[in-house]
Amino acid sequence: MEEFSFMTIIAVFEEIFGTGLFWAMVVVAAVITLAYLYVLVRDREMSMRKFLLAQVSMPVGGAAAVWFVMLMTNSGFRDIGGPIDWLVLLGVFGAGAVGFAILVYVVQSFVRGKTTDA
């Protein structure tokens, strides 16, 4: 592999998850991101109470992301070979944690509506 491009990354993810699931995950991530932006514009501020609960839920999202990737790649922790594997695993955990926190914040905002922290 002499050239590394964005299309190469997409091809690798399509190979890991399958084309349909990968693009479904991209669409879901885009919808959650747009919902988050909508909530921020609608409320004109971040609720620290909702933000705290979202942060507390981050380990759940990170663990779920690692579990999902291990399930989809048909791998286990015994298959982790070197430092790059651990870095990728930490990246998956971090991405899952942040994504889940955003999802929790959005769901709270839609369920509870705009609240004041005072």
Image (cartoon, rainbow, N blue to C red):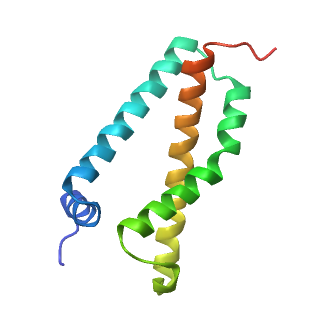
Counting from the top left corner in percent of width and height, residue 72 is at: 36, 66
Q: Is residue 66 above or below residue 41?
A: below
Q: Is residue 2 above or below residue 18?
A: below
Compare residues 65 and 42 and report the one nearer the observer.
65
54, above or below 50, in the image: below
- Residue at 42 percent across and 64 percent down: it is 69
Q: Position of residue 108 (x, y in %)?
A: 60, 26
**Camera-side residue: 95 or 28?**
28
Where residue 14 sits: x, y (%)?
Answer: 23, 60
Which part of the image, by quadrant, shows the N terminus? Answer: bottom left
Horizontal side of residue 66 vs 75, given as left or right:
right
Quadrant in which the C terminus is drawn: top right
Q: Residue furthest right?
A: 118
Q: Quick check: 68 above or below 3?
A: above
Query: Looking at the image, which residue is at 72% across and 35% down?
Result: 52
- Residue at image location 47% in from the left, 87% down from the top: 81
Position in image of residue 71 (x %, y %): 41, 67
Q: For this view, does 107 lie left or right of residue 73?
A: right
How many labels, in total? 0
Residue closer to the observer: 75 or 6: 75
Taking the spot 25% from the left edge, 47% from the top edge, the residue there is 23
